[in-house]
Image (cartoon, helix red, strand yellow):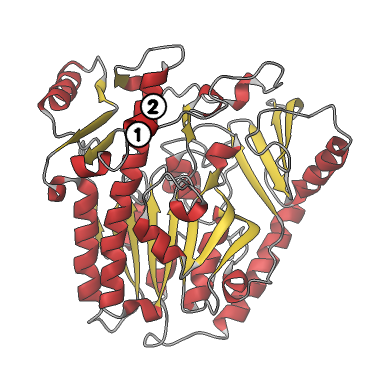
Amino acid sequence: MYKRNLILTGLAVTASINVWSQQKTNHDRQNILFIVCDDLRPELGCYGRKQIKSPNIDRWATQSVLFDRAYCNIAVSGASRASLLTGLRPTKNLLQTWNARTDVDVPDAVTIQKCFRDAGYITIANGKIYHHQDEASMKYWDDVMPPVPGTAMGYHSDENLALMQKQQKTGKGRRGHFYEHGDFPEKDYLDWQIADKSIQDLKKLKKQEKPFFLAVGFIRPHLPFVVPQKYWDMYDHSEIEIPENYILKSGNNIPERALTNWSELRAYSGIPEQGPLDEETAKLMIHGYYASVSFVDAQIGRLLKTLEEEGLDKNTTVVLIGDHGWNLGEHGTWCKHSIMNTCLHSTLIINSPEIKTPHRCEQIVEFVDLYPTMCDAAGIERPAQLEGTSLLPLLKSPEAKTKGYGVSRWANGFTFIQDQYFYTEWRDKDERIIERMLFDHSNDGDENYNVAGNTLNFRFWTIRAHELDEYVSFS
């Protein structure tokens, strides 16, 4: 571990010196617009999902670098955000849970808003950026629009509101239904309000002398799938299809610990406390998710339109992500909290003045790479703690290469990704390997068959994964 930390610190300090030597003045520094969508996997038209209606993000992607192989470092919102906003990888004991806190797990870390504020930036956070609104580092935002407690559910119908009120009074029971659509004013929805606040901020920030770091966190497509009627009506329910591997195939050799029990979904009314969803409920889940993606696409469209109308796109790097992937019925599972590709693979689209040729990037990248990327795009000094690799070279040239691997984890397991291989192992408290999993995406992109133990490639990939022990903290 000492060797790993020494190497990382040395690399980061060297990078910091190089970047520091090229410091820019406030007048020519790039702004940063960082957009985070909760639970948005690459379920977008620009990623080849033709059933999805996401015209605004799709248009923006044609002007940007779209990353086909971007992976979160942990598939749960609180930990994923804490990790990417500190540039630190989750370990077995730190940055692991849905309610992870940077000020508890890594109190000495320089959060991204502190880094940019110290560099002379105006820093603003609208909506859900961190999981908690009372973290110590929140003081480094110049302005914060936190979600009002309880509004993330976003219910408007009398039935769902009554269910929520009952739960709040008794402390028992369930949330409302997992979906809702109706003819309610769009401006009454939280994501519309987050977009509107951010639009007003852009207009004000244009007049400021300082550059800005504006973080915008949208709630959807997180559960419950609450949308105005017109977004629900974009999809013909009779054409909704459940995934081919909704029913687990026999002989797949996939460990039970690899799959989520989707306890998050089971908290909603109408969902069985155990067992699978019937086919109609499964289709409603998928319909709701699709509609939520289209709804948030519209809000992002409003925001990006303002960025262009104000002329800020010419000097702003825009980073758009989903904080992790999500299961849409694959292997009979829903939600995140898993180490399968459906949860690790996420959305990443970057637009920047640094881009000379918009393109699709098929290099493997990780979310810990985002912090150093934004620093380099802005021309500010990187903190020495950062464990990722800047993606700026990939923005400048379609021929550029990354380090070529990614590491994600969940609970006591971690996944090493390189080329078409996804190797996963679980360790006990004494760091002994207790179970393994290997998928070859060249012939099993849906991860239906764990081939660990019966492939000639297995030994090579386990050895290659363990070469990372000096660089990545698995303990």
Can I make out residue 458 in this image? Answer: yes
Q: Residues within 10 Å of mark 2 (few under 14, many from 20)?
A: many
Q: Residue at x 72, y 17 (%)?
A: 251
Q: Is residue 330 above or below residue 397?
A: above
Q: Is residue 163 above or below residue 364?
A: above
Q: Quadrant of residue 408?
A: top right
Residue 155 falls in which quadrant of the image? top left
Above/below status of 426 relative to 414: above
Q: Kindly report the distance in space between the C-alpha atoms of the residues bearing marks 1 and 2.
A: 6 Å
Tell me if residue 74 can be seen.
no
Q: Amino acid at mark 1?
A: His
- Residue carrying label 1: 287
| Residue pointed to by mark 2 | 283
In the rendering, at what x and y percent does residue 344 appear? 56, 42
The x, y position of residue 171, in whole percent, is 22, 18
227 is higher (above) or lower (below) than 54: above
Q: Position of residue 182 (x, y in %)?
A: 16, 36
Query: SS of the residue at dot 1?
Result: helix
| Residue 232 in picture, x, y percent from top left | 26, 39
Horizontal side, residue 365 vs residue 229: left or right: right
Residue drawn 50% across the image and 84% down it: 23
Q: Secondary structure at mark 2?
A: helix
Q: Amino acid at mark 2?
A: Lys
